[in-house]
Amino acid sequence: MNRRRSNRGTTGLVCALVLIMASSALAQQWNRYGPGTRYAASSIYDVTNNQMIIFGGQHSTTQVNFNDVWYAHSIIEPTATFNALNWSTFVPMGSRPSARFGHSAVYNTVSNRMVIFGGGTGFPGPCVNDVWALTNASFTSGTPSWLQLLPTGTPPTAREGQASVYDPATNSLILFGGSNCVSGYFADTWVLSNADGITGTATWKVLGPQGSPPSARTGASAAYDSTHNVMIVFGGDNGAVNNEVWLLSGANGATTPTWTQLIVAGTSPSARTGHAAVYDAATNRMIIQGGSNGTSNLSDTWGLTNANGLGGTASWTLLHPTPAGPSRRLHTAIYDPVSNEMVVFGGATDGGGSTGGFISDDHIYVLTHANGK
């Protein structure tokens, strides 16, 4: 990640030179440019403008939560030099969501709105269950503004760490599980229709899928096959980590939803939570990276072929990028299907589990040939 001195640092230096005779309290100062270190933030990918948009998260040492919005420009570069990567930030108009971590964030490219739900607002909580939309999220068609949505229907219990996906065909946010920020875990599944509030009133509906559901958990990852309306859930924990793969067919609620545990051939990744995951629809592959096994962080990268359970036997493949991936958990990730690159940001880089305190990070890593092909 490139860093440069901000204009604020230059301004401070000029003021010091001009006013040094009047005051000895002024001093030269370097200002860091870019987001503060954080984990459990959210990210979306604006493919039209080639930028990663990041919201919120928590700082490790201070346990301070964020509610800022950052743009990582030129996030995908065909030459893989990344010399043009740069950060910018903007305070959107309107009242802002409370600072938070572990929330959901999805993006409607048509309406140019980012939608966030829930999250933890303290350390470790409490959790919230509010819904916000960032209008003009890409900052290319107008000034970004925060708008609180007030969905009809009974909302989910306040939570963080839920697995969530977005269905662009029905403008729906789909979420599973999470934690109540204390010691409770959820196994319920919800759909927020008209999620961005632009096509109609946002409405909550709890799903009652057929089949035996996954156990309650937080820190699982989710991917979505929009063609077949299947949500793919991997890993997570409820005090004990797991490496299960679950499929929710009929995920947007338009048809009868059904949970099925996917039986995967070959050696599976070790059990983990707080990992990053993306999905390549063209090859039907889910790619996961890092996470925590409950004791220490992981740095491995895996690909799940036939991830939606259709068209062939699902199987795991251990990928071997050079160098190895970053060792971290609670990082956020996006995927560019054109360049076949996975981009991860931030996360906690300490040992994880009970071995010590959190150490958050502010680096961006890009995995080329992400789907293993």
Image (tube, grey):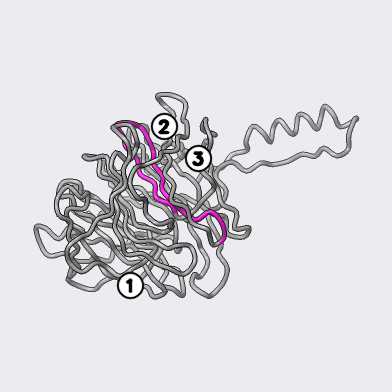
Give, as a three-letter code, the residue at label 2.
Answer: Thr
Residue 369 visible (yes or no): no
Q: Is residue 239 left or right of residue 243?
A: right
Q: Position of residue 102 (x, y in %)?
A: 45, 55
In the rendered image, which residue does mark 2 sit on?
A: 135
Say above or below: 308 vs 99: below
Give, as a three-letter code, the residue at label 3.
Answer: Val
Looking at the image, the residue that sits furthest to the top is: 142
In the rendered image, which residue does mark 3 sit on?
A: 69
**Circle 2 residues within 10 Å: few <14, some 14–19, many ≥20:** many
Eye-nearest disc, 2 or 1: 2
Q: Residue at x 29, y 46 (%)?
A: 166
Q: Residue at x 59, y 39 (%)?
A: 4
Magenta stretch?
Answer: 103-123
Looking at marks 3 and 2 on the same chain, the residue that comes earlier in the sequence is marked by 3
Q: Position of residue 32 (x, y in %)?
A: 62, 43
Looking at marks 1 and 3 on the same chain, the residue that comes earlier in the sequence is marked by 3
Q: Is residue 317 magenta?
A: no
Looking at the image, the residue that sits furthest to the right is: 21
Q: Quadrant of residue 259?
A: bottom left
Give yes or no for contact between labels 3 and 2 (Cβ–Cβ under 8 Å).
no
In the rendered image, which residue does mark 1 sit on?
A: 242
Q: Is residue 71 left or right of residue 314?
A: right
